């Protein structure tokens, strides 16, 4: 067991003195990741009840999610909600990303006094308790008959996604040398052309990550959807939440498994983009 | 004509250009500003106003008075603070050693561990809450395992109560504490520790007198983020609390959904907002905004 006497830090702590920290840390990392994965085997269970490990396997909950067409109203609630979520999340990308990027560009270039005033206002959607934003939006949207509409949902979700876009693009622009644009403009390019041909290609990976995060934020959003969505336009997370409050329906395990696959897929793409970005420097 | 006078027209032109530039940059932030104004400032301002409107439609402190007198509301405030404080403390107790551990690893290994922190961060909140519901219920994995190992004879109740809520909330909040704390610890110059030990400090002493104080800004940022997020939390306590743990956000929601009492909901919301605002204000004085932004 000589490796236990190996030094593990600058202050000559040996591995055996610090073994507790290693064990503790890996245990916590285990507890961070594994509990969410329990829904995967559950989703393939044949039983109504949530027994673990499942005694019999089946795909019935996936069938229920994809093909449970309700006779009385002629559509599948889960599928309908999934389409709404997808539509809203994609539209959110197209609202939040340009607005956030423009604001980040404006903030980076403007003087620091203006930035100091605007920045806290711009990240306020992250700071104000989301429940307050949700009921405020509900009240506001009632006046404009936007409750239960796709537009209302997109506006609400964009509001939460914009600060994330802003922070990501802002930090990318901070590391970018704006003089490059000045060079292009001194050679006769317009400001817009300089941005499009010089700046944009260099920050495009950050903008892509930002838009993926905007997508994920919208897709996972619950509380604003709870108030603003309604009628035929429920979102998937809203339907799941309402179902969870009432009973434990194993269909939710199937949907959860699909959501885990989607979000880990996107996270991997974002990480790969990040690596590409770093290698380029 | 002096040279200075000859440069005057040029100077004026440059100033004009600079002013135009500033206007352009401000213009670019306008859509964002408009969205925030229309969708947060005006609606929340409206709620603020509603909270001061009594039942008969006149201006009054009625909603606040009723809130302060009602035992139910006092209990909700106490529950909200209790859960938020406990979650924050547990997160710090678990998150600090983990962040420290990660900061001592090589970049490569730290990045691998970071994936472990980030995966739950990006997994849907609802999925994670549901997973805990499955694990912690009476016939769930945890109870079954404990019975099989002979630790307990009867399934114990660990969900639909405060314990379950705390477990779920700590799991969800932990990444918010670890991210700023880890960034801060990474930035600490390791030579300071070497210097301390070369001056004869034991590793423990070097840690407590050098490393710990230097990591405080990150810890503080993490604690405040977690606490503020906990105060407004809704989904996890609603599902894992099983109706027994009622936090402020849940009361606001039920005030609207069940009773349509906008005044009461707004008043509670304003209190929540003011408390959050005070904490964030203190935070911005203690930790520079840059550190919060660099998460």
Image (cartoon, coloured by chain):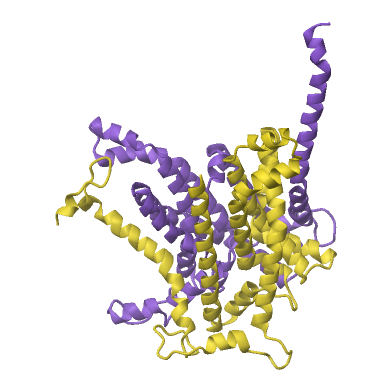
Chain colours: A yellow, B purple
Asked if residue B282 shows in the view, the reply is yes
Q: Nearer the viewer, residue B108 or A71?
A: B108
Q: Quadrant of residue A189?
A: top right
Residue B231 point in image, percent of width and height: 57, 57
Q: Nearer the viewer, residue B68 or A162?
A: A162
Residue B267 point in image, percent of width and height: 71, 57
Q: Residue furthest bottom?
A: A71
Q: Residue at x 29, y 33 (%)?
A: B196
Residue A181 point in image, percent of width and height: 67, 38
Q: Residue at x 74, y 60 (%)?
A: A136
Q: How many marks?
A: 0
Q: Is residue B35 above or below residue A31?
A: above
Q: Residue furthest front?
A: A187
Q: Is residue A271 above or below residue A51?
A: above
Q: Is residue B166 above or below residue A20?
A: below
Asked if residue B137 shows in the view, the reply is no
Residue B76 point in image, percent of width and height: 59, 62
Horizontal relation, residue B102 to residue B226: left or right: left
Q: Nearer the viewer, residue A36 or B226?
A: A36
Q: Quadrant of residue A82?
A: bottom right
Looking at the rendered image, the quarter that the N terminus of chain A falls into is bottom left
Q: Residue at x 55, y 85 (%)?
A: A62
Q: Residue furthest top?
A: B1
């Amino acid at each position: 067991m000589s490796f236990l006497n190996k030094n593990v830090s600058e202050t000559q702590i040996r591995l055996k003195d610090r073994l507790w920290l290693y064990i503790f840390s890996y245990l916590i990392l285990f507890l961070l990741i594994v509990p969410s994965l329990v829904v995967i085997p559950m989703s393939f269970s044949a039983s109504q009840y949530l027994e673990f490990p499942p005694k019999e396997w089946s795909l019935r909950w996936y069938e229920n999610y994809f093909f449970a067409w309700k006779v009385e109203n002629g559509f599948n609630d889960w599928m309908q909600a999934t389409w709404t979520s997808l539509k809203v999340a994609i539209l959110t990308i197209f609202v939040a990303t340009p607005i956030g990027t423009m604001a980040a560009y404006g903030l980076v270039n403007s003087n620091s006094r203006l930035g100091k005033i605007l920045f806290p206002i711009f990240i306020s959607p992250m700071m104000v308790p989301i429940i307050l934003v949700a009921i405020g939006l509900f009240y506001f949207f009632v006046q404009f008959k936007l409750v239960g509409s796709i537009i209302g949902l997109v506006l609400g979700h964009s509001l939460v996604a914009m600060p994330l876009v802003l922070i990501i693009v802002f930090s990318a622009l901070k590391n970018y040398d704006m003089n490059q644009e000045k060079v292009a403009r001194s050679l006769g390019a317009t400001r817009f052309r300089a941005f499009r041909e010089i700046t944009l290609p260099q920050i495009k990976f950050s903008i892509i990550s930002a838009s993926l995060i905007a997508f994920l934020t919208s897709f996972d959003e619950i509380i604003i959807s709870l108030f603003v969505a309604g009628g035929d336009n429920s979102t998937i997370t809203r339907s799941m939440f309402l179902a969870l409050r009432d009973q434990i329906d194993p269909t939710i395990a199937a949907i959860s498994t699909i959501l885990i696959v989607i979000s880990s897929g996107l996270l991997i793409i974002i990480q790969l983009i990040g690596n590409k970005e770093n290698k380029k420097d | 004509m002096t040279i200075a006078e000859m440069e005057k027209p040029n100077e004026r032109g440059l100033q004009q250009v600079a002013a135009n530039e500033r206007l352009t940059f401000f213009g670019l932030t306008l859509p964002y500003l408009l969205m925030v104004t229309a969708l947060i400032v005006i609606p929340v301002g409206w709620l603020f106003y509603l909270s001061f409107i009594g039942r008969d439609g006149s201006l009054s402190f009625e909603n606040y008075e009723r809130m302060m007198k009602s035992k139910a509301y006092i209990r909700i405030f106490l529950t909200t603070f209790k859960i938020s404080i406990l979650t924050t403390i547990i997160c710090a107790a678990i998150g600090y050693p983990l962040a420290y551990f990660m900061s001592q690893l090589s970049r490569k290994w730290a990045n691998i561990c970071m994936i472990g922190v980030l995966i739950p961060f990006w997994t849907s909140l609802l999925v994670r809450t549901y997973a805990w519901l499955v694990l912690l219920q009476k016939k769930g994995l945890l109870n079954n395992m404990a019975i099989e190992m002979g630790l307990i004879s009867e399934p114990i109740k660990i969900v639909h109560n405060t314990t379950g809520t705390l477990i779920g909330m700590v799991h969800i909040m932990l990444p918010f504490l670890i991210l700023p704390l880890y960034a801060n610890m990474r930035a600490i110059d390791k030579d300071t520790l070497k210097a301390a030990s070369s001056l004869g400090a034991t590793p423990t002493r070097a840690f407590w007198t050098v490393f710990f104080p230097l990591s405080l800004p990150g810890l503080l940022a993490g604690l405040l983020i977690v606490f503020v997020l906990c105060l407004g939390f809704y989904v996890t306590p609603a599902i894992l609390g099983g109706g027994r743990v009622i936090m402020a956000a849940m009361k606001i929601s039920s005030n609207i959904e069940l009773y349509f009492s906008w005044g009461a909901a707004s008043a509670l919301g304003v209190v929540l907002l003011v408390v959050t605002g005070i904490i964030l204000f203190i935070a911005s004085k203690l930790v520079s905004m840059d550190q919060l932004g660099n998460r």
